[in-house]
Each structure stands twice: as structure tokens, then as C-alpha cells.
Amino acid sequence: MPTNTLMFNPLAPIVQNGVSREMSAPNGYYDQAFDYVYTVQLTGNQELLGQFIPIYTYADFAWRALVTTVITGQYGIKFTDAQGYYLSNNYINSTALLCTPADPFCWPAEILIPAGGRLLFDIIDLSGSTNNIQIVFRGANRFAL
Amino acid sequence: MSAAAIAPFPYTYHTPEGYGDTFYIYAYDADNLQTGGVNYYNQKIVISDGDFLVRYWSGFTTSVPVAEQIQIRDRLRNQWFSDFLQIQANIPNPTAAYMGNTGWPVMPEYWYPDSGYIGFDLLNVLPLGVPLGQLAFMGVRRRKGFRSDPQPSLYSPWYEKEYSFSTQVVIKSGTTSAQTTLVTVPITDYDFELRRIDGWMTGGIATTWMGLDTGYFKILLLDSNKLQVSNVPLLLSNLFHVPSPAAVLNNSGAAPVPKNFWPCPPMLYPVNSSINFNLYVTAAKSPLAGTQTMDITFRGVRRYPCQ
């Protein structure tokens, strides 16, 4: 097959070949990679309802993926979108969400949280003992041009 | 299959007019962070000779984790994360081995200007005097007037065919970190486009994929003009590919997911040039105990001219 000098390594993932701001955002906007971090220590079987991370007021947040960087026991979590609409009917076991940063748990489509909004969720410990957890909400700050 | 039946290629990256992107890695050796348990703020890697676009970072959890927590900053010193990433917590954390080891994609990419720097803060540094940790930021250099990787061939048109160059390197017992082992792999017959580097120890140290954190060697890879493609020699775990079944092969469980698909974009080595690289023994393993043998395979495609 005749080729040109396409700047692409077919053995590598797209992100390593490069995803520019133009490729990431819709017209009229540009994206800047950003992650919101949630850190918590749950006691055995503790349930925390209405947990949230406030989104900065200067940019929307396009939430695309999830990485659990710290976990000392199983937990359950139930997310909502920006309108408080639950994304599952019950708690999802953390085992179903575990992954690596190179292979994160991804949403089928990004969830847009408006500037000044909240990442809202309920979380419960399932290990029965003290549980140190850190969850990283991966995505991008979306600025209007 | 007709041409119309072939799906359009979905990758639409555009380098600005007049600029060229070439593969590069900026790395930070944690060798100087000798005091464990201390916070090191405002650490930096200075960007030089062109802009730099970060597409991936890794190395936080190498043989010895660099620190417990990290915050990285963009060119304006804005944070990458709303809070510190607690990657290597001093608590039982089954995910820790993967957080820094397999690397973090950056999407969309972060741009740093020439003469700027990648700044970061390290909390509760962990090396405790063992100089092994190395953070690496992978991406491309963007320079005006340069051609992007992979360079075109002098002949055209061509077609690609899978090809690999393999070499065996022996590093003798007693080699110190001050000594360099220069290896040259001649490129014969046709142009070669490098797309992946595989390597494994075959003697001495237990047989293992070199992209795993053996912590024994560093490599300084050169392009076809004999210019280095990283600012410092890289730990092999920051450059060499690790395939998916590595954990099975090694019974280690250290890296159950594939990683390191470098170089990206691919690099061209024209016919009659050579792949040159320097191997170094890390300070922690110097002088080297026992002779070590390794197989290194440069995988990619040959470009055959269309007759």
C-alpha cells in the first residue's frame, strides 16, 4: 500500500499520537485537560450522601473518565449528572470501576458539568473497616472562545 | 474492496503551518531528592530548543516511588489537578503499583513554550537515598521550520512492510554508572520507520521485560542525526514497551497492562544511517554485579520503493 508520511503510529493509542484542543472541544470552545480529585476516609460501613466537588466558576468541566488512585477496601458509589439525575439505580461496587490511569473507566459520552456546578455522588464503605479512598475525575476544563 | 468502501481515517491532527513535531521525552531524575519524608515544591524541567506538547506522563512509581503525592502545573503555573494526587500512599493500596507505573494520558495535550518549564510539587518524597525514581513527560517538540516525524524518504512512492532490527547487548560485570556502553544498529537496504522498542534480559538478572522496573539501566536514544530524543538518559521503564502478558511471563504482577508505545510519532532512520543509543548502569546498581545480557528489538516498518 503506497503511503505518505502520516504523523501517526498505528501501534500506539490515539492519545499518544496527540489529541489537540481542536479535536477535543466543539466549535467555539477549547479544552484544557484537568482532573478533579476527591479524597475521603470512610469508617466501616459508613454512608455519605450528597458528596460533591464544586466545579470552578471559570470553566465548564467535561467529565470523561474515572481513576481510583487509592483504595484500601471495597466501596460503592452512585453518581449523578449536573441536574442531579442518578446515573445508576444503585451503588456500583468499586471493583467494577477499578482500572489504571492508562486504561481508565470511561463514560460512553462525556458528562458536562457547568461552571459553578457540582460533581455529585453518594458513597458507601463496603469493607466494614476504615477505608482510605481517592477518586480522580478525569476530563477537561472547557472555555468559551 | 473499493476505495469508497474504506472508512475515512478518523485521526485529524494538524500541526500548525510551518512547524514540525518530533518525538521527545523530558525526564526528571529524582536522584537529588535524597531526604525522605520531605516536601519538594517548585521542581521543574526546563523546556529548551522548541515548544513542547505533553501527551503522557509516567514514572511516578518506578523501582522506588518518587514521592507520595504530586501536583503538576501548566505553563502559567495553573494546577493540572484540583488537589494533590495521592499515588503512593503509605497505606495498603492495591492500585498504587499501577498509578505511576503505567502512566497517565494527557488529553487534550498540554503546551509548554520554549524556555518555559514543566513545574511540579512532590510531597513526602520517598527515595530515602536510593536514586532510582524518574518522572517522564512524553510528547513532541514543536519547532518552526522543522519537518515532522516521521521524515519522508528520499524516494517516492513507497510501501510499508513489517520489519524489526534486533541486537544483543552485553554489559560486563563491574561496569559503573560513569561508563557508557554505545550501541550502533546499522540500517541496511531500505529506510526504516521505528514504531516500538522491545527489550528483555536474557542472562544475568532474571529474564524479564526491560520495560518493567528493573532499575538497572538507563538509555539515551539518538535519532538518525545522532541527536538525543530525551533531555537525560531514561530508565528503561520509561521507554521500552511492555506487552500485556508481561506479568504472566515474569510472574511479577508489576505491570499487567501494556505500556510505552514509543516513539510516537514514529522516527525515520534512512538507509545507511544507524540507530544509536547509549546504555548506562544506574547509580543505584553501580558497579554492576555480574555480566548482564539483553536483547533489544526495534520494531517498525521498512519502506520499499514502488517499482
Image: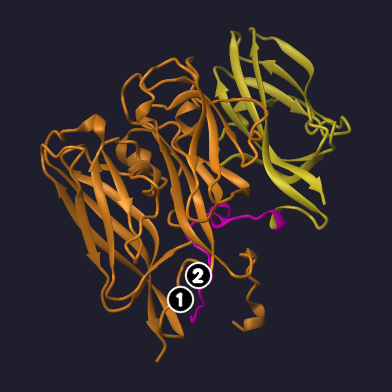
The residue furthest right is A83
Q: Please name the residue that numbered disc 1 is placed on.
A: B152
- Of the residues shown, which amino acid type is indicated by label 2? Arg
Q: Residue A18 lies in magenta, yes or no?
A: yes
Chain A shade in the render: yellow
Q: How many marks?
A: 2
Q: Secondary structure at mark 2?
A: loop
Q: Is residue B264 visible?
A: no
Q: Quadrant of the N terminus of chain B?
A: bottom right
Q: Which residues are magenta?
A: A1-22
**Letter of the chain shown orange in the rendering:** B
Instruction: Answer with left or right where residue B170 lies relative to residue B77.
Output: left
Front residue (pair B267, B21):
B21
**Which of the image's four quarters has the C terminus of chain B?**
bottom left
Q: Is residue B301 magenta?
A: no
Q: Residues within 10 Å of mark 2 (few under 14, many from 20)?
A: some
Q: Which residue is mark 2?
A: B147
Question: Which residue occupies the foreground of this view, A8 or A70?
Answer: A8
- C-beta proximity under 8 Å, tags 2 and 1: yes
- Marks 2, 1: nearer the viewer: 2
Badge 1 amino acid: Pro
**Residue A86 location, x and y as percent?**
83, 31
Residue B34: image quadrant is top left
Farthest residue, direction front: B115
Relative side of A82 to A136, left or right = right
Asked whether residue B30 appears in the rendered view, the answer is: yes
Give how far across and how far down residue B217 sits, in percent: 26, 41
What is the secondary structure assignment of the residue under circle 1? loop
Q: Residues within 10 Å of mark 1 (few under 14, many from 20)?
A: some
Q: Is residue B3 left or right of residue B20?
A: right
